[in-house]
Image (cartoon, rainbow, N blue to C red):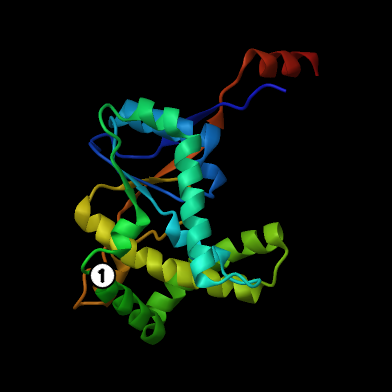
């Protein structure tokens, strides 16, 4: 069977000049051939960009079934290490100089992270608009995970909400560090300023998104199979 190759198609304005990339190591859309397509598309359009690796954020998806918080944290960190090792040559080709990679613990150790995390937790608990926006994204992810893992959707939904609340706080920190839009292959908030508007006392603006989609790169074997079919 021919190896799958992809071309990444970034939906960005013609005058766009920069971007960032935030990666979830367990995402199939951000690993292997699709990661290569993403990096190639970014480099062709913008040049190399900062990469933020949301590895220990995945602790929320690893909780349960007797797994403690500390065990989940170690597992998530280990998966991030593995992702970096598996994609080392790809990343070395992407970055012109030293790799510009920030891991999630650097974000959660930021001096303002705890304040922002508490702010989005309070907003979720008290504001119907914020809660609906977060739940809508979490419902979509939970439906996919329920089919894939065959687990109870209630537990997965709870984990997804916990994940999202920490992610929002972390993304607001990332937006302060580098306000460029994020190249992202999945479903996310259409309004990147929604939580910032709803929480007047705390900076909760998120990166805006340049969506990326993937097209199969047709190989000789693909074309031959189509002719012979």
Residue 94 showing in the rendered view: yes
Relative to the observer, which residue lies in front, 162 or 195?
A: 162
What secondary structure is found at the residue carrying circle 1? helix
Q: Is residue 1 left or right of residue 47?
A: right
The location of residue 115, given as percent across then percent down, is 25, 75
Q: Quadrant of residue 206?
A: bottom left
Relative to the observer, which residue lies in front, 178 or 183?
A: 178
Q: Quadrant of residue 117?
A: bottom left
The location of residue 2, given as percent across then percent down, is 68, 21
Q: Is residue 64 left or right of residue 193?
A: right
Residue 206 showing in the rendered view: no
Relative to the observer, which residue lies in front, 160 or 62?
A: 62
Quadrant (top left/top right/bottom left/bottom right) for the N terminus = top right
The location of residue 221, given as percent across then percent down, is 69, 15
Q: Residue at x 32, y 67 (%)?
A: 169
Is residue 222 shown above or below 172? Answer: above
Quadrant (top left/top right/bottom left/bottom right) for the C terminus = top right
Q: Residue at x 25, y 70 (%)?
A: 196
Is residue 36 shown above or below 186? Answer: above
Check disc 1 and report the residue beneath it: 196
């Amino acid at each position: 069977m021919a190896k799958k190759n992809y071309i990444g198609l970034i939906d960005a304005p013609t005058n766009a000049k920069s971007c960032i990339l935030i990666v979830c190591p367990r995402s199939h859309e951000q690993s292997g051939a699709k990661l290569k397509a993403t990096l190639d598309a970014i480099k062709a359009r913008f040049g190399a960009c900062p990469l933020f690796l949301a590895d220990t954020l995945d602790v929320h998806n690893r909780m349960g079934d007797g797994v403690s918080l500390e065990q989940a944290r170690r597992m998530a960190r280990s998966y991030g290490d593995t992702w970096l090792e598996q994609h080392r040559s790809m990343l070395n080709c992407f970055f012109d100089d030293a790799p510009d990679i920030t891991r999630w613990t650097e974000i959660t150790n930021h001096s303002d992270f705890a304040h922002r995390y508490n702010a989005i937790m309070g907003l979720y608990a008290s504001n119907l608009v914020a809660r609906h926006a977060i739940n809508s994204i979490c419902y979509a992810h939970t439906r996919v995970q329920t089919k894939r893992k065959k687990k109870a959707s209630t537990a997965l939904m709870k984990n997804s909400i916990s994940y999202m609340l920490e992610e929002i706080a972390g993304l607001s920190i990332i937006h302060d560090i580098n306000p460029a839009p994020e190249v992202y292959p999945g479903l996310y908030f259409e309004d990147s300023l929604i939580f910032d508007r709803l929480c007047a006392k705390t900076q909760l603006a998120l990166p805006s998104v340049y969506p990326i989609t993937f097209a199969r790169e047709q190989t000789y074997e693909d074309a031959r199979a189509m002719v012979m079919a």
